[in-house]
Image (spheres, rainbow, N blue to C red):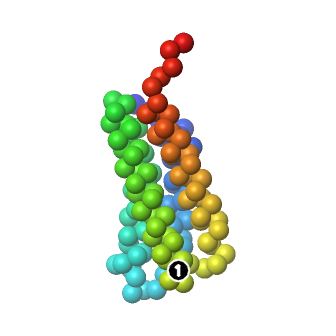
Amino acid sequence: MRDHKKLNAFRLADELTLNIYRITSTFPKEEIYGLTSQMRRAAVSVPSNIVEGCARESEIEYLRFLEIAFSSLRELAYQFDLSCRLGFVINDDVQPCLNKLVDTEKVLSGLIRSLREPKQKQ
C-alpha cells in the first residue's frame, strides 16, 4: 500500500480543494445546488481518488484511479473558468487558484506518465 501523504500530487490536490471550498463560499446562494456543488464535488474527487488509488494493490488499479483524479481535475478547471466568466470569483482569487490548478495538473500528469512508461532495464 502506498502512502498518499508522501505524494506531491495529493498535497497539491488537497490544497486546491480547500481553496475551492473557500472560493465557492462566496458564490450566489442560488448556485448552492448548481456550480457550487459541482465544483466542490469535482475538487474533493481529485484527492479522494488519489487516496483510493494508493490503497489499491496493483499498479494498474493505482493508475486507473489517478486517471479518474485527473479527469475530475480537468472538470474542475472548466467549472472554475466558467465561474470566473460568470463573475462569481473575486479577482484576487483568480490567479492563485489558476496557478494551483495548473501545478496540480502538471504534477498529477507527470505521475501518471511515469507509471505508463515502460520501466527501463538497468
> Residue at 58% across / 56% down in the picture?
102
Q: Nearer the viewer, residue 99 or 57?
A: 99
Quarter holding residue 22: bottom right
Look at the image and tell me in which quarter the C terminus lies: top right
> Residue at 51% across / 20% down in the picture?
120
Residue 56 visible in the picture = no
**Kind of residue at disc 1:** Arg
Quarter holding residue 116: top left
Q: Position of residue 89 (x, y in %)?
A: 56, 78
Q: Nearer the viewer, residue 86 or 97?
A: 86
Extreme residue in the top direction: 122
Q: Is residue 6 left or right of residue 49?
A: right
Q: Nearer the viewer, residue 71 or 54?
A: 71
Under tag 1, what secondary structure? helix
Q: Position of residue 35 (x, y in %)?
A: 40, 76
Residue 14 visible in the picture = yes
> Residue at 51% across / 67% down in the picture?
20
Look at the image and tell me in which quarter the N terminus lies: top left
The correct choice, above or below, for 86 with respect to 50 in the image is below
Q: Position of residue 43 (x, y in %)?
A: 44, 61
The correct choice, above or below, for 88 with respect to 21 in the image is below
Q: Position of residue 34 (x, y in %)?
A: 36, 78
Circle 1 sits on which residue? 85
Question: What is the number of callouts on the image?
Answer: 1
> Residue at 50% across / 34% down in the picture?
114
Classify mark 1: residues with Cα within 10 Å, few (<14), some (14-19) or many (20+): few
